[in-house]
Image: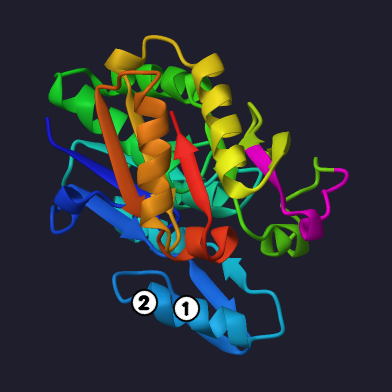
Amino acid sequence: MSFKIILDSCGELLEEWKGDARFESVPLTLMVGGESIVDDETFDQKSFLRKVAECPESPKSACPSPERFRQAFDCPADHIYAVTLSANLSGSYNSAVLGKNLLLEDQPEKKVHVFNSCSASIGETLIAMKVQECEEQGMSFEEVVETVEQYITEQHTFFILENLETLRKNGRLSLVKALVATALKIKPVMASTDDGQIQQVDQARGMNKALSKMVEHVVKNMTDSEHKALAISHYNCEERAIQLKELLEQKLTFARVVILNTAGVSSMYANDGGIILVS
């Protein structure tokens, strides 16, 4: 059976997915000052970094319209899946569900499922990888949905950012009651909750110590790592991503490790030097 996997553009695409008709990225829109930037293949991370640094206002994002998702769903594939940002962080999930319903009004026989990632960035990528794995194993549509929904409940997202201001100003830190003083170079270790909100789980003085704290949390939450993939995304700090990978590989063995640059939406929230890990 043929399949198609659609990610909103907060999810990073693997290199082998680019140009593959079975995968599509539906772009969010980023707003920096008065400029709108479509988060698609034209996104320029370095240019975006400069524009954000020069703009006194916090950047914002807008999710894709239901009609844009409907267009992505309207394809010949037998099984169609979408993976979106956590529904507690963005309207992208609800928009995709509305897009699915629009399609089913005209084509009720279509098999379409929208996954709420309860994550973001590389977390969406891992979920799409799991969907692809299940499809290539020959699972039925219903089996894929059940397997991947269970996989999402077992996934853990962690991140450390040089700057949490964009998340704070855009209301994404509602569960974080107080943030430590940046003047002391204290780095909070952040994580997703089970329902896809953001919480602080640890902190350390300096980035290197914070990365070590993150590794401790990954190890504590990880089981059966040799059969699982690890994914790391970063904003303009590949050396830091490699350092994190090496720290983890000293303690655990993974079936696959993926390191990717953040796309536009993730870049907006991660800011320069931000790093995201999902296992």
Give the number of marks.
Answer: 2
Residue 106: percent from left, percent from top: 34, 50
Residue 171: percent from left, percent from top: 76, 57
Nearer the observer, 36 or 179: 179
Q: Vertical placement of 28 versus 191: above or below?
A: below
Left or right of 158, for residue 152: left
Q: Is residue 111 visible?
A: no
Nearer the observer, 234 or 119: 234
Nearer the observer, 262 or 145: 262
Quick one: SS at disc 1?
helix
Left or right of 69, for residue 61: right
Disc 1 marks which amino acid? Answer: Phe
Query: Is the C-beta separation of discs 2 and 1 under 8 Å?
Result: yes
* Quadrant assignment for the C terminus: top left
Left or right of 1, for residue 192: right
Magenta stretch contains residue 189: yes
* Quadrant assignment for the N terminus: top left
Q: Which residue is mark 1?
A: 48
Residue plotted at (23% across, 19% down): 140
Residue 69: percent from left, percent from top: 40, 56
Q: Label 2 vs label 1: CA separation?
A: 6 Å
Disc 2 marks which amino acid? Answer: Asp
Q: Residue furthest right?
A: 177
Q: Which residue is mark 2?
A: 44
Residue plotted at (40% across, 72% down): 45
Q: Which residues are magenta?
A: 177-190
Magenta stretch contains residue 181: yes
Quick one: SS at disc 2?
loop
Residue plotted at (53% across, 84% down): 51
**Would you call the spot at circle 1 few (<14 residues within 10 Å), some (14-19), or many (20 or more)?**
some
Q: Quadrant of residue 77?
A: top left
Residue plotted at (58% across, 68% down): 61
